[in-house]
Each structure stands twice: as structure tokens, then as C-alpha cells.
Image (spheres, rainbow, N blue to C red):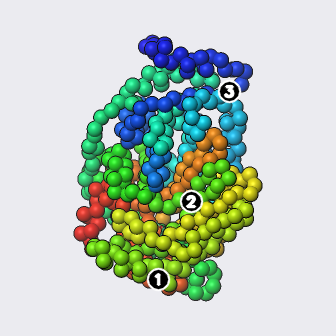
Amino acid sequence: MVTLQKSKWKHFWNGWDSLNRSKEVLYSYTKKISEINPLQFFHNGSANFKGQRFFWTNRARNEMIVGLGITLQFSSNENGKERYLEIEKRWKQIVANSFCHSPNSHIGPYMFGGFSFDPKRERTPLWEKFAHTEFVLPTVMLTIKDDEAFLTYNFFTDTSKEKVNQTLLLEEALLKDGTHSYGSSELSSFLEMDPIEWKQSIEEVKRRIVAGHMDKVVLARELRTKFLDSINVESVLSILLEEQPSCYVFAFEREDNCFIGASPEQLVQKESEIVKSMCLAGSIARGKTIAEDENLGDTLLSDSKNLQEHDFVVQMISNSLKAVCQQVTTGDRPKLYKLKHIQHLFTSVIGELKDDVSIFQLIERLHPTPALGGYPKEISLETIREVEVLDRGWYAGPIGWMNLKGDGEFAVAIRSALLQEKEASLFAGCGIVENSDPESEYEETRIKFKPMLSALGGIRHHDSNE
Ligand SMILES: C=C(O[C@H]1C=CC=C(C(=O)O)[C@@H]1O)C(=O)O
Ligand SMILES: [Mg+2]
């Protein structure tokens, strides 16, 4: 057995040896390291942890997390409230039985994962690698926060010393520096799933809205792409990081599948008693010139159909938070949120919790907001189950992390794709209200596919269809 340099790891082993082993305990050891490119770290992890990696960055890019390996996995196919509560309960038990060493009280073990959009929807083979709810506590984790980098190791005390040793031995290879251009693979085919039926489903939903069944429903569609070689996750991530500032960029690997995306939309962020959320709904294209872009932005800001689409989201999110917060502040009018391919209406929401409400309880209250489901919630979910042909899986579901203190952040997993070796399924949806025009909604989803298509190298193919 190769042994470690003793002095370097003395502190680690002192902690490990001091633990009471009468019951299983999580030992989490964090140390500060010199800064490393998180994508490089993710890539370095492929030799030993391929299929068990995750990548996350917030929109401001001052918090990035990469996880490698699985020390603990929580999954659930519960379809009610329990899916949130069960995971939370288990995480609390782990926390209560943990021994964490860290130079920074904010950095330590994180649980990362997500939820499918609708747990009541039966899973199709497309999403078989993803449970309705799935979280992991990684074995090795890189956290970069405000320009400081930390490496965290998570082991349960029943892990053999040899196994722990083997993991620690990987450190040098994991922190190796390098410059990479990750190879991309060539798109070989491109299939829009049922565009005609999709437009018909918009008409059907509009009829129901006019008949008073509900106010808004978000309908999504799927694009299937095939490539000549296996898709390189690192390559896709690097393009998303470059092309999609102001977006969360995430990837969650499950064996040979990877759910990946660059979403502008925050579902919820909790830091002690402060809760933030965001209303993002209502869309228009970017202009080719500054003048055209500003004109389009002005049109969006005064367009009654888009303002209506947006307002349902503002009402729902602010009312949901008012029930648990002593104070909720909502932007007084929508602003523009401009991305590379599209611009949206957005309103920020911030509240101060009055009770001890967990981030999972907040997710349960908020998901799905009318930006992804519809308004009112239950009837729009039933309508989606009935009229939508695709299996959304994790598309439009909450994805993110929670730490030891119960703080965390979740994005809504839109502008996303499921990578399956040489194939990728892309998803995009849009809010249908009574004045929706199927053709314009179809165009809107075409634009929403672009961020992922561009990262996959397929944008030329897409645009040549215009
Ligand atoms: C459902 C999606 O976008 C939502 C977020 C922003 C704007 C939206 C819209 O204008 O329809 C959607 O509600 C998607 O990108 O798949
Ligand atoms: Mg829209």
C-alpha cells in the first residue's frame, strides 16, 4: 500500500483517530488550498469519479462547488410533501452526528442534488438514471467562495483506513493545473419532437383558460440531438460558463448520463433568516443592434401578454413567502434580464423568515412557480400531465445545494439538457396565457433552446432551419 506523507495529513488523522466509533459518524475535513479552476478540478476527477460528479456555480460566479464521488446518496420516489421532508430529516440526522473540521465556519460538507419537475408523473426510460429526488454528499468537494478555495473530504467512520488513504492520495492529481481545450463532438441529427401537436396543445390550453379553468399553464417541448461521438461534459460546461454569464451553470452526473444547463432563474436562496427568490417570466429576442435591442426591451416592458405572464409569478411567489416571512419586499415593476440569446422580465423578491422554516420547506411552498407550472398550481400541473407528451424529468425542477447550517441555494433547472453519451435531449417551455399565439410561443422555445444548442455545437444546424 502506498502511504501518505505523514506530516501533511497529521491533522486529518488526528481528528479521524479521535472519533468515538460506537456509532457511525460523518467526519468532514476541510482545508484551504490555492485557487484552482473548478472546471479543471471537475475534469481531473474524471479518472476516478466519472459518473459521480457535480458542478455548480451561482450567477455572480463568486460561489462554485464541484463534487466528486458519493459518500452518501439520498434518493426518493415519494410523490408528495414527503419528498422534501424525508431528505431534510436524513440530512439533519447526518449533521447531528458529524464531526467537521474547517478553517471557515461557512465551508464544509454540502448536500447537492435536485428534484424532478413532477413526482406524480411516471418516469419514462429517458430519465431512468434519475430518481424523482436525488441528493449526494460527495467524497471530495471543491468550494470556491469569494476567491478563496477549499477542499473538503467526507467520510463515514465505518470507511476503512485504506480506502480513506487511497482517496487522500488522489489529491495531487485532482489539483493538477493545466490548460485544456475540451474536444467537442459533431452533431449528426436533430429532431424536434411533435411541433405540430405541441402547437395544438397550446390551442387546447388556451380554450381551457378562456373557459375559466385556470389562468396560465407552461408548456414545454423537447429537441433530440445525436452526435458522432460521446458528448464531452467539460466542453459543454466550458462554453456555458463563457456564453452564459448571469446564469447558474450546473451539471449532475448519474453514471453515463448527465443533466446539465445554464439557468438564469433562481428558485430560492436562504442565508440564515433571509430568503431570496426571483420572478422570471415574459420573454423577447435580443436585437442585432443596440437600438433594436432597446426597442425590443421596451416592447417587452409594455407588452400586456408578457406582463400578465409575469404577474402571476410575482403574485404567487410573494404570497407564498408572505405566509412565512415577517416582511417581503418585491420590486415595484418588472425590469429586464438580458441574456445572450433572450431577454426576460424579472422582479426580485426578498423576505425575512419569521419562523424556523427550512430551505426544503421553502422549495415545497414555491415549486413549481407559475414560471414553470402555471396558475393556479394544482390544476395547471394536472393539465400539463394531461396534454404534454414529453417526460420533463428534472427539467424545470429545483437543483442546488444545502449546507450544514441549513443555508442553501436552488435554481430552476431550465435551459437544460439530458446528455446520454452520443445523444442529448433539450427542453424548453413557455407560459401560455389567454392571448398566447402558438406560432410566437413556438419561436420563443426555439430561442430558449439556443444556449444549450450552442454549447453542444449545434447552433448552426438549428439556425439553418430558420
Ligand atoms: C420555462 C422556461 O422559461 C421560463 C422562464 C422565463 C421565461 C418564461 C416565459 O417567458 O415563458 C418561462 O416562464 C424555459 O426556458 O424552458
Ligand atoms: Mg413566455
Quarter of the rendering containing residue 427: bottom left
Label 3: how many residues lie within 10 Å, few (<14), some (14-19) or many (20+)? some
Residue at point 28% right, 43% down?
A: 182
Residue at point 36% right, 76% down?
A: 294
Label 3 is placed on what type of residue?
A: Glu
C-alpha span from label 1 to label 3: 59 Å
Badge nearest the viewer, 1 or 2: 1
Residue 122 appears anywhere in the view: no
Label 1 is placed on what type of residue?
A: Ser
Q: Position of residue 297 (x, y in %)?
A: 40, 76
Within 8 Å of ligand 1, the CB of disc 2?
no
Total marks in image: 3
Q: Position of residue 378 (x, y in %)?
A: 65, 70
Quarter of the rendering containing residue 460: bottom left
Residue behind mark 3: 24
* 341 relative position to 89: left or right: left
Label 2: how many residues lie within 10 Å, few (<14), some (14-19) or many (20+)? many
C-alpha span from label 1 to label 2: 25 Å
Q: Position of residue 244 (x, y in %)?
A: 38, 57
Q: Is residue 410 above or below residue 45?
A: below
Residue behind mark 2: 267
- For numbered disc 3, what is the local secondary structure? loop
Label 1: how many residues lie within 10 Å, few (<14), some (14-19) or many (20+)? few
Q: Nearer the viewer, residue 344 or 203?
A: 344
Badge nearest the viewer, 3 or 2: 2
* 89 relative position to 195: left or right: right
Residue at point 63% right, 40% down?
A: 404
Cβ atoms under marks 1 and 2 closer than 8 Å: no
Residue at point 49% right, 34% down?
A: 150
* 22 relative position to 68: left or right: right
Cβ atoms under marks 1 and 3 closer than 8 Å: no
Residue behind mark 1: 302
